[in-house]
Amino acid sequence: MKTYTITDGYFLIDDTMKHHTKTVTARLNSISGKHRIVESTDPVKQTTKYLLTNELTWEAFKIISVYSNRWVVEEFFRNAKL
């Protein structure tokens, strides 16, 4: 993996919870083209999530927001199959 840029940052959820993020734009051996990888760490739950997108201009907050909204849809369809 060849790294192009790394960005560190924080963002607030509900004006109280601070998430730490790292964003890397890279080329991956197994996927053609450039991609953004966002590492999001939740200090309260002590969990880290990695998100991958081909939207190179999106900031970490937008990527996490889109994935969060999409996750609700995925959960709905998964539960509907049960």
Image (cartoon, grey):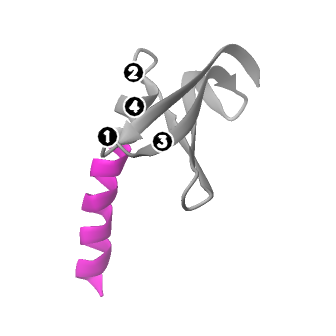
Mark 2–mark 4 CB contact (< 8 Å): no
Q: How far is the residue under mark 3 from the one under mark 4?
A: 12 Å
Of the residues shown, which amino acid type is indicated by label 3? Lys
Q: How far is the residue under mark 3 from the one under mark 2?
A: 20 Å
Q: Earlier in the sequence, mark 3 or mark 2?
A: 3
What's drawn in magenta, residue-wise? 66-82
Q: Nearer the viewer, mark 3 or mark 1?
A: 3
* Residue in the foreground of this view, choosing between 22 and 66: 22
Of the residues shown, which amino acid type is indicated by label 2? Trp
As displayed, is residue 11 above or below residue 32?
A: below
The label number, if any, that marks residue 58 in the structure image: 2
Q: Earlier in the sequence, mark 1 or mark 4?
A: 4
Q: In which quarter of the image is residue 35?
A: top right
Q: Magenta includes 78? A: yes
Read off the residue under disc 4.
Answer: 61
Of the residues shown, which amino acid type is indicated by label 1? Val
Q: What element carries label 2?
A: loop
The x and y percentages for residue 67 are: 37, 45
* Residue in the foreground of this view, choosing between 56 and 6: 6
Task: Judge from the rendering whether residue 18 lies leftward or rightward of residue 47; answer left or right.
Answer: left
Task: Judge from the rendering whether residue 1 lies leftward or rightward of residue 57; answer left or right.
Answer: right
Q: In which quarter of the image is residue 71?
A: bottom left
* Residue at x 25%, y 60% (from the top left corner): 73
